[in-house]
Amino acid sequence: MCEKVHFEIAIRASQGARRSQEDTALAWPMQSSVAGDDGVTLLDLPPAEAGHAAAVLCDGMGGHIGGAMASRTTSEAFLAALMTAEGPMRHRLMHALDSANTALTEQVKRSPVYNGMGSTLVGVALSADGLQWVSVGDSLLYFWRQSEIVMLNEDHSLAPEIDKLAETGKISWAAARSDPRRHYLRSALTGDDIEMIDLSEQAAPLEAGDVIMLASDGVNTLEPETIASIISDCAAEGASAIAKRLIGSVDAIRAPHQDNTTIIIVRVVAAVVPNVAPSGAAAADGGARNNV
């Protein structure tokens, strides 16, 4: 007997205190989504492939109309390009990112009213080989294992720079946490050259029970320790329960200026499958294909 990895995926979102939803989240092979104001986007993607998954989350900027269009444009272009690209995964992720950025330029050419729109992006590819990612902006990629949580990607907002000032004693931590510039972006997809890109060097190994979370920055209403505790409490119930509880916890705080919050939860599951055929010959492709 051997273990064959597959993935359980859930997406949940909250508009928060904002007038519109400007996040878009897509996953493959689910082909389910949260997209701008209409909440629906379906791409013509390849059929499910056992042991593989991908997801992308984009947080748009540019006002009510521009933000929603930017996040939808970038996420759809990214996932479609990732699914059709060939070669090493690092190359495929960068190709998908470039495609997403180019898609913004093309959209503005078609509809100049969208000039100035932009989006953050965090995208992941998962397989038995592990987790790889690319990100631009301040959307988050968390990794949870056995009650411990770490943030995998870089934060391209001003928040890390402001926190450095507090760490060196140049400003107080209270001033750092309340600084209105914390959410200013140092890098984003706008159709122009991308200032900062975070690309994983190699695949991060995965184990059964691991949880990967992609989230827009509205989730920062929750401390990482709180996020870890919620995942620990709900991990056995599955990805949907985790995502629902996290969004519910953000909403329960009722922050007066709560940003859109969108979460993609990917839970790693290992199914035990036979590696020997009944005849005694090695099985070419044994086991049920559950989920992904």
Image (cartoon, grey):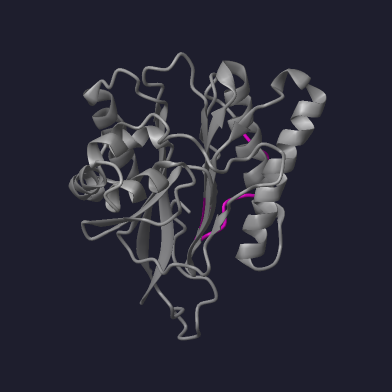
Q: Is residue 258 above or below residue 226?
A: above
Q: As drawn, which residue projects farthest toward the front?
A: 170
Q: Is residue 61 above or below residue 241?
A: above
Point 43% across, 34% down: residue = 183
Q: Is residue 252 left or right of residue 268?
A: left
Measured as percent of width and height from the top left, residue 78 is found at: 64, 45
> As rendered, which of 98 and 281 lies closer to the eye?
98
> Is residue 17 magenta-colored?
no
Point 51% across, 70% down: residue = 202
Q: Is residue 194 above or below residue 184?
A: below
Measured as percent of width and height from the top left, residue 137 is found at: 52, 43
> As rendered, which of 160 and 259 lies closer to the eye?
160
Q: Is residue 273 left or right of residue 23?
A: left
> As rendered, which of 185 and 291 lies closer to the eye?
185
> As rendered, which of 170 and 89 lies closer to the eye?
170
Q: Is residue 27 visible?
A: no
Count numbered badges in the picture: 0
Point 67% across, 26% down: residue = 116
Q: As drawn, which residue projects farthest toward the top?
A: 19
The residues colored magenta run 42-54
Image quadrant occupied by the N terminus = bottom left
Q: Is residue 50 visible?
A: yes
Q: As drawn, which residue projects farthest toward the bottom?
A: 280
Q: Is residue 286 left or right of residue 12?
A: right
Q: State the predominant SS element of the stretch in magenta.
A: loop
Measured as percent of width and height from the top left, residue 103 is found at: 73, 38
Measured as percent of width and height from the top left, residue 157 is found at: 47, 42
Q: Is residue 120 left or right of residue 139?
A: right
